Image (cartoon, rainbow, N blue to C red):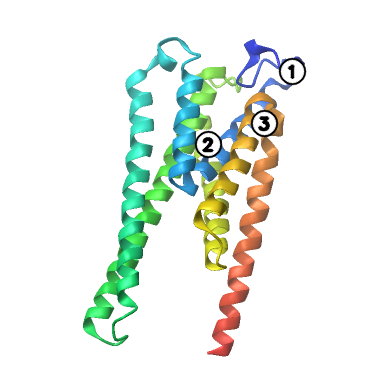
Amino acid sequence: MDLFAPENLPGVGMGDLESIVAVLGMIGLAVTSGALIAQGTLGTILFVISGIAVLQEKPDFGGSTPAALVIFGFLLVAVAARTILEMRATREEAGVAGLAKDSKETKQLVAEVERRRRMARALTFLAVLWGGAAVGFAWAEWNEVPFRLEDAEAIIGLGLGLLVAAIGGDAAWRFLSGALRAGGSALVVGIVVVVIAYLLNVASFYIPFVGIVPLLLAIWLAIRLRRRAQQKYAGLRILS
């Protein structure tokens, strides 16, 4: 199996193991793409730049320039809207500090902050699913993953990409949220997430069977962070 032959990139042409290796590569790309998009502005921009660079290797920008522009355009609009919502929520939250806790104005501001944060989370989740589905679909179409189901490869790729991107995005979001609550720097923590996710993304691109590693890592991280949050919540309930 000539893993590093240029004609095999991104990912397949692997003899009898073609299907398995192709799917693992797809999984690795989707889960790390979900983590990148969940991080925010830096990760999303890196995802878009990388996607454009890959599509430039295909005739007619992957065969459908308008579709590619819609995919990347939505991700950029979503991350811009998310950033604006989070900035406004942070500014309004700072304004609450000087007000009486039980006043009507304070309650309204707190409700508005929570509303903006919920909208930002919803946009992030939607963008993660959008990016993961696009990665899975493009990977399957590009490589014609040999499930022998004719055009169903694209549907399988889209669904699988969406699922594992959600896992990667959830793990990244939990890690970021926990680090920020612990007093970490948003910029530093964000860069760490982006660097790790992108390195695993590149590894999944060039050595597709490595794709199982980021998936297992994301599942382990998400489970561990969820348990930690539940234990902390249980402790707070006992104290109260």
Q: Which of 45 and 11 is in front in this view?
A: 45
Residue 116 image offset from top left, x and y in percent: 31, 61
- Of labels 1 and 3, earlier in sequence is 1
Amino acid at the residue labelled 1 = Asp
Q: Mark 3 points at which residue?
A: 203
Residue at screen point 32% across, 65% down = 91
Q: In this view, does 145 lie to the left or right of 104?
A: right
Indicate which disc, 2 or 1, sits on the residue closer to the N terminus. Answer: 1
Tag 3: residue type?
Answer: Ala
| Image quarter hosting the N terminus | top right
Looking at the image, which is closer to me, 157 or 90?
90
Which label sits in the foreground, 2 or 3?
Answer: 3
Could you tell me if residue 137 is visible in this image? no
The dot on residue 161 is 2
Tag of residue 16 = 1
Percent position (x, y) of residue 76? 36, 38
Of residues 26 and 175, the one nearer the viewer is 175
Q: How many marks?
A: 3
The extreme left residue here reads 105
Label 3 SS: helix
Q: Residue at x 51, y 47 (%)?
A: 166
Task: Tell me the SS state at disc 2.
Answer: helix
How far across and down, in percent of the image, does residue 123 sit?
37, 50
